[in-house]
Image: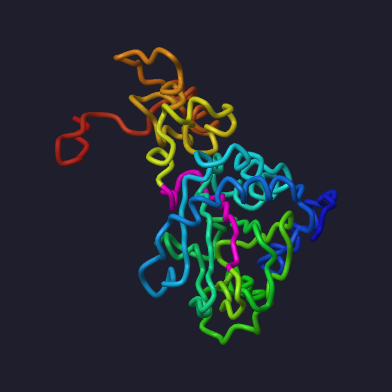
Amino acid sequence: MNAAVHPVDVQHRYEELKERGFCIIPGALPVSVLQDLATDLAPAFERTPFCQGDFYGARTKRFGRILARSVHAATVVQCPAILTLAHQILAPACDRIQLNLTQAIGIHPGAPDQFPHRDQDMWQGVKGEHEYLLNVIWPLTPFTADNGATRLFPETHGQRALTDTTPPPAELAICQPGDAICFLGSTLHAAGANIAETERRCLVTGYSLGWLKPYENQWLAYPPAVARNFPPELAALIGYAQHRPNLGNYEGQCPSVLLGDDVPEYLAAIDALTPDQAKMLAGYGKAPSSVTGRIDPAGRVDDR
């Protein structure tokens, strides 16, 4: 098992993601962090029922709310190299990124190949113009060819996700705890069949555009009574921050106001504008209007 933590060449990994749609970062975090996380999650793995439905898999277990189940989860979610990659991939299309989910997955012996899919398809927006998501799989047990290692289809992302051509052969993400499997939301992928005699476990962390509805309802997973115990940066990542302009507010203010000890009953709404909007607003009224006269209820201008 890899024990060493290696410096991450983020720019190289970014270019690999853009070129192939995925990359594997060896030794992204200390093995001990993943071992401690695995120990904390072991009871939930045992008690969680198997999934229902052919997509999730009847021989697979899944559960979320990982930040509330283990103090070690925050280290994984806030891995600096991963956050840097997520910002590089997603920032061109949003004001801030958000945590899309934390999900533990256990694939049991007898599980078949999962249906190949793209995670961006959970959203119905226009595809191919920008990325919606960066996913990271953190093995909690070794990923092998026999126990269901994730299958990744190279160069099936971006604009190529819009074609109907037969995808190239998949590559198996064979790796160890401490390694990070990163792939874009537009990349075709699937869990492999588990023909081994042991369960394959992992944690998935996903980062999406801040203006999207996340896969996991973070405010139910981590209500204010829970989130106020998180560092401010982590609370913001799970949604206790506005996405400009004014998206995701509480009574017109940043929802982080709910994390204080004394939340006022009545709040004054506060602008949360993008710099361009603030600039336009500042200039409004200083230049002559291009329209004069009155506008009737039907929207017609009466310039008498």
Image coords of residue 226 (percent x, y) = 45, 30
At horizontal 38% and vertical 15% (from top left) the residue drawn is: 263
Q: Is residue 246 above or below residue 134?
A: above
Q: Report the number of numbered marks.
A: 0
Where in the figure is residue 238, as x and y percent of width and height?
50, 39
| Residue 113 left/right relative to 1 | left
State which quarter of the image contains the C terminus: top left
Indicate the quadrant containing the N terminus: top left, top right, bottom left or bottom right.
bottom right
Is residue 28 positioned above or below 56 on the image? Answer: above
Residue drawn at the location 37% of the way across and 40% of the way down: 220
Direction left: furthest residue? 297
Q: Per the image, is 211 magenta?
A: yes
Q: In this rendered view, identify the residue nearer to me: 217 or 210.
A: 217
Q: Quadrant of residue 158?
A: bottom right
Percent x, y of residue 12: 80, 57
Give percent across and percent down for residue 138. 65, 56
Extreme residue toward the bottom, this view: 166
Is residue 164 on the magenta stretch?
Answer: no
Residue ID at (50%, 56%): 45
What span is in magenta? 199-216
Q: Residue at x 46, y 54 (%)?
A: 63
Task: Give the camera-side residue of 254 and 58.
Answer: 58
Task: Determine whether 64 is above or below 227 in the image.
Answer: below
